[in-house]
Image: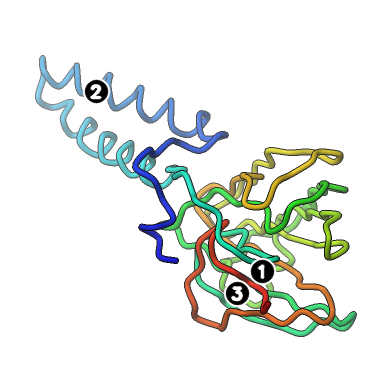
């Protein structure tokens, strides 16, 4: 399913963006008003207005029609790596650029059993050691057993905003959190389940199927 077919006409902004967006938008509006009296203020008004427009685009949160599959992509982006794990699971790492939608979605329906913030660095998300960055580790109890998902901050994205806490019930493709300005999301497929995506493939959160049927 394409991005266009996955979205409806109504676009909204992601939760958790107010601390970034509101001051920028207010500054843009104020300098625009001042520029009407003194054109020198346009030197500030123009870049602030452009920044506000960019943030509105960056923090868009489109509606999605969920895809079909046992495990759906938790993030918009590109599959960066697919790695077998020592315990038999398979890690699928999805790189999110600043141009992607930053809202992450539940890969399966189930219950949130834990949401753990882990302190770390801020290496670029494409760096092989970025899995040691600032991150939030999620565990879901699902029909496939325990599913682990990790939101990883990058060099720019230094704030992860979970929308849910442990004990919450979640539907597949439901919004669960935000990584400001993109970064990386890892999903661990249980032993015996092979990935349906390949390295370099684009994914759409809540739409692209990650597992082979």
Picture residue at 61% right of the left edge, 44% below the top: 175
Q: Give the answer, above or below, for where 14 lies relative to 203.
A: above
Q: Circle 2 — which element?
A: helix
In terms of secondary structure, where does tag 1 sit? helix
Query: Viewer-proximal residue, 35 or 99?
Result: 99
Residue 102 image offset from top left, x and y in percent: 52, 51
User: Percent from the top left, x then y, of residue 154?
Assistant: 59, 59
Give the residue at x 11% y 18%. Answer: 36
Looking at the rendering, which quadrant does residue 21 occupy? top left
Q: CA distance from mark 1 to mark 2?
A: 39 Å
Image quadrant holding the N terminus, namely bottom left
Q: Secondary structure at mark 3?
A: loop
Read off the residue under disc 1.
130
Whether residue 140 sits left or right of residue 183 in the image: it is right
| Residue 31 circle label | 2
Mark 1 / mark 2, whichever is N-terminal: 2
The span from disc 3 to disc 1 (Cα, nearest Å) is: 5 Å
**Label pair 1/2, CB-CB below 8 angstroms:** no
Q: Residue at x 50, y 71 (%)?
A: 78
Query: Residue 60 in the image: x percent, y percent?
Result: 42, 43
Task: Say whether residue 157 is left or right of residue 109.
Answer: left
Q: Nearer the viewer, residue 192 or 132?
A: 192
Q: Nearer the viewer, residue 56 or 205?
A: 205
Q: Which residue is mark 3?
A: 127
Which callout, 2 or 3, points at the residue further toward the start of the chain? 2
User: Pointer 1: residues within 10 angstroms few (<14), some, or many (20+)?
Assistant: many
Assess whether mark 1 and mark 3 are in contact (beta carbons under 8 angstroms): yes
């Amino acid at each position: 399913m394409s991005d266009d077919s996955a979205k409806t006409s109504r676009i909204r902004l992601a939760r958790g963006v107010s601390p970034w967006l509101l001051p920028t938008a207010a500054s843009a509006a104020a300098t625009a008003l001042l520029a009407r009296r003194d054109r020198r203020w346009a030197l500030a008004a123009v870049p602030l207005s452009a920044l506000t427009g960019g943030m509105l685009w960056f923090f868009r949160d489109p509606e999605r029609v969920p895809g079909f599959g046992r495990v759906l992509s938790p993030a918009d982006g590109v599959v960066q790596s697919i790695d077998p794990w020592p315990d038999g699971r398979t890690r699928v790492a999805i790189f999110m650029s600043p141009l992607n939608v930053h809202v992450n979605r539940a890969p399966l329906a189930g219950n949130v059993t834990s949401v753990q913030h882990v302190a770390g660095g801020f290496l670029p998300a494409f760096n092989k050691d970025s899995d040691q960055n600032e991150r939030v580790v999620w565990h879901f109890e699902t029909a496939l057993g325990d599913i682990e998902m990790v939101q990883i901050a990058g060099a720019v994205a230094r704030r992860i905003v979970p929308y849910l806490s442990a004990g919450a019930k979640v539907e597949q493709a439901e919004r669960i959190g935000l990584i400001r300005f993109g970064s990386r999301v890892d999903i661990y497929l249980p032993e015996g389940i092979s990935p349906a995506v390949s390295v370099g493939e684009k994914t759409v959160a809540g739409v692209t199927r990650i597992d082979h049927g």
